Image: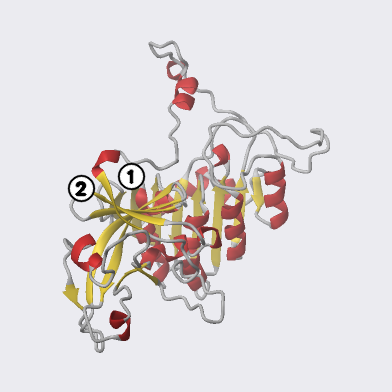
Amino acid sequence: MKITFLGQGFESASKQSVGNTIIKLFKENKFSSFTGISAFASEAGVVGLSECIASGTEFYKTLNLIVGIDQEGTSKKALKEINNLGINSYIFYQKESPIFHPKIYLFEGENDTTLIVGSSNLTARGLFGNVESSLMVEFKNDNADGIKLLNEVKDYYSSLFDFTDPNLFKISPEVINQFVSEGIVPTRKVWKKKHKKNTSNKTPEENDLEIPKRPIVKIPSNFKGRYKSNKTVSKLITELEIDKNFEFENEENNEVLWQSGELTERDLNIPKGKNTHPTGSMLFKKGTLKDIDQRHHFRDNVFNTLEWEFDTAKGKTHLERAVAQIRFVIEGTDYGIFPITITHNPRTDTASYKQKNSMTQLSWGETKNLIAQDELIGKTATLYKDVTVADAFTLIIE
């Protein structure tokens, strides 16, 4: 049995993030069953893994997913994306105060099992960007200690793993709409401590959504103390609730390097018209910058401190490439830092160069699913540099 610590967000690389690990596991053909249990899910998190899950349908006999919706942590869009996966998926919800908060990702095969338990939700930040800690346990199915651990997990959550729990609601458009109409699931991702009250005109007896009551765990008295300010713990938690709108920690240390014009379908990798093709990249056009030569400015000024190397692929050896660590903030949500490839064409004999077009572009890479959204058409992208951290950038789209 092998136990590995999966840490992420505490440093920029986070190669062993839960997101990266899950992607790798889905690419292995030694598993035939996946079960994910997560307190929250985001649209970006589900969409990001959808390709892996889709590819897994070739050799996975079962694909199961259970998500919670407490604290309005899972939006309607996220649930719709889960429904679109076409897998065995459920909402877990109870009216009582305990929050549904487990994060379990289980891969099972004929000879191998891998179990991840930790703090990572099925969200883009939870899988990649947040500071999270998890343990991954890998074992052969004839390993006594591994089987013992797996049985303990499955026994404790037996009604979840066999899908008989009365507080499980199979995800469907109808169920999603019911939870939205009850004010329990938000139409967009927000974070609050309390559920909205039912604002419909229905009386309790007329509500279609029947949610069974569950026993409440008694909290020990020593966890009900008061702080010196005479505020209860619950009031203090509400008071300290993190604002999810992104703000720079040191505003004065961030300088604007570039701001785009209105983003287009082509910029955002959204193919719509006959002449619009997804390129997977965006040119650094002049945007709002004045008095610059966009053919050279971005390579020689904006990204001049990166480690540039010429491509070695046949037919592309004239292209210079470098990797920048860029934090993506989209409409107030910080999705974390991604390694983004920047490409520059130094040739001066091309039509683009002679027409004074931009010769530098970024490849969206892993962020492709984050930015390919109709809602972002017409928005503006602004690139910042933290002058206190070498080669650190932030791209804000709003």
94 relative to 232, above or below: below
Q: Which x, y percent locates residue 194?
A: 58, 31
Task: Name the disc covering residue 387, or none.
Answer: 2
Nearest-to-viewer mark from 1 and 2: 2
28 relative to 374, above or below: below
Name the residue rendered at 56%, 81% in the picture: 274
Q: Compare residues 260 and 92 and report the one nearer the observer.
A: 260
Mark 1 or mark 2: whose residue is earlier in sequence: 1
Q: Compare residues 207 and 219 and report the one nearer the observer.
A: 207
Q: Compare residues 137 and 333 and report the one nearer the observer.
A: 333
Density class for disc 2 (Cα within 10 Å; few <14, some 14-19, many ≥20) is: few
Task: Name the disc covering residue 131, or none.
Answer: 1
* For residue 109, side relative to residue 314 (left or right): right
SS label for mark 1: loop
361 relative to 355, above or below: above
Query: Among all residues in the image, which is located at the extreme front?
Result: 291
Task: Name the disc covering residue 49, or none.
Answer: none
Which quarter of the picture shows residue 1?
Answer: bottom left
Query: Among all residues in the image, which is located at the extreme bottom?
Result: 315
Name the residue rendered at 40%, 62% in the picture: 367
Q: Which x, y percent locates residue 37?
A: 51, 50
SS label for mark 2: loop
Q: Which x, y percent locates residue 189?
A: 54, 46
- Residue 39 in view (yes/no): yes
* For residue 85, side relative to residue 234 (left or right): right
Density class for disc 1 (Cα within 10 Å; few <14, some 14-19, many ≥20) is: some
Q: Amino acid at mark 1?
A: Val
Name the residue rendered at 52%, 81% in the picture: 275
- Residue 15 in view (yes/no): no
Q: Which x, y percent locates residue 113?
A: 40, 61
Question: What is the C-alpha distance between the residues marked 1 and 2?
Answer: 23 Å
